[in-house]
Image (tube, rainbow, N blue to C red):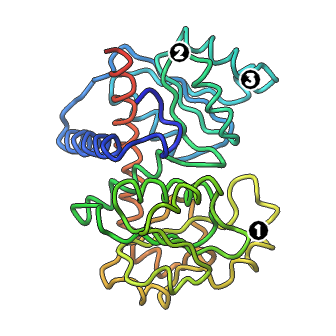
Amino acid sequence: MKHLLTMEQLSEKEILSILELADQLKYERKHHIEHPLLKGKSIGLIFQKSSTRTRVSFETGAYQLGAQPLFLSSRDLQIGRGEPVQDTARVLSRYLDCIMIRTYEQKEVEDLANFGSIPVINGLTDYCHPCQVLADLMTIREKYGLLKGLKMCYIGYGDNMANSLIVGGLKVGMKVSVATPKGYEPDKHVLEFAKDFKDFELTNDCIKAIQNADVVITDTWASMGMETEKEKRAKDFAGFQVNAELMKYAKANAMVQHCLPAYRGQEITEEVFEAHADEIFEEAENRLHAQKAVMVQLMKEKED
């Protein structure tokens, strides 16, 4: 594994290896066992999109691993003033040991990896969100002890979260069902990937999708940069809210996940969110541990 650009690039073995290391790092953190595995390393954190969880978890995680995190907003870099991505990649590769970027276009992440000579981590693009999905899988496995055979249901907008959940879930042997309004389906490349899996279902029927689900996941109806569409989407997504009535069709002990921020009363009700708050905030914490595992694997492999 040279980079983490998409879930598609990871094998089941690589995903499970990351999760196992994340479990170990989480245990050590909880028991105050220091693990400066990346002492002397530096990671640049490029933010074209603002963030709470991505910034804090990567900065804190790098520090806990003994590395130096450098927060780099688009205002701080010449890339924000039009410098070609390939030039930024080649310069930063001479200063740093790894780059994490949270941005809009997937191509920008791919270009950083192609033109640079150090590992690149996708902290989020409009296409996918692999770091979040690794944390989701970690949280699900913590509850159930396994992933293979469980049913994951995603309800809402077929966005970057849906794209990565479909790929990640299917790769580790989960059954994956997705319910979206017409016109809001996941990316066509992801659907092309999923068509070969008999345990994948895409529907416009929420009840059909959530039937006997072990895990129910949702996300905001309007992703960052789509704020002007909120009113329209509220109408288009009527009936796609995760609420108590819909949850009756999932398994009795089904867990709920949300990548946050959550808009209570829209994609999820206050009642359901608070009933599953412990699971949702465990998921948020696991961003820290999963991303630490990714950083260790990428930078240690580069070192080797």
194, 186: nearer the viewer: 194
Residue at point 32%, 85% (across, down): 252
Residue 79 - label: 3
Q: Position of residue 206 (x, y in %)?
A: 55, 82
Residue at point 62%, 18% (across, down): 115
The answer to whether 167 is drawn above or below residue 120 in the figure is below
Please give the residue where the numbered disc 1 appears in the rendered image: 230
Picture quadrant where residue 152 is located: bottom left
Q: In the structure shown, which secondary structural element does the residue marked by tag 3 occupy?
A: helix
Q: Position of residue 41 (x, y in %)?
A: 40, 16
Q: CA distance from mark 2 to mark 3?
A: 18 Å
Residue 267 - label: none
Residue 117 - label: 2
Q: In the structure shown, which secondary structural element does the residue marked by tag 2 occupy?
A: loop
Quadrant containing the C terminus is: top left
Quadrant containing the N terminus is: top left
Q: CA distance from mark 3 to mark 1?
A: 30 Å
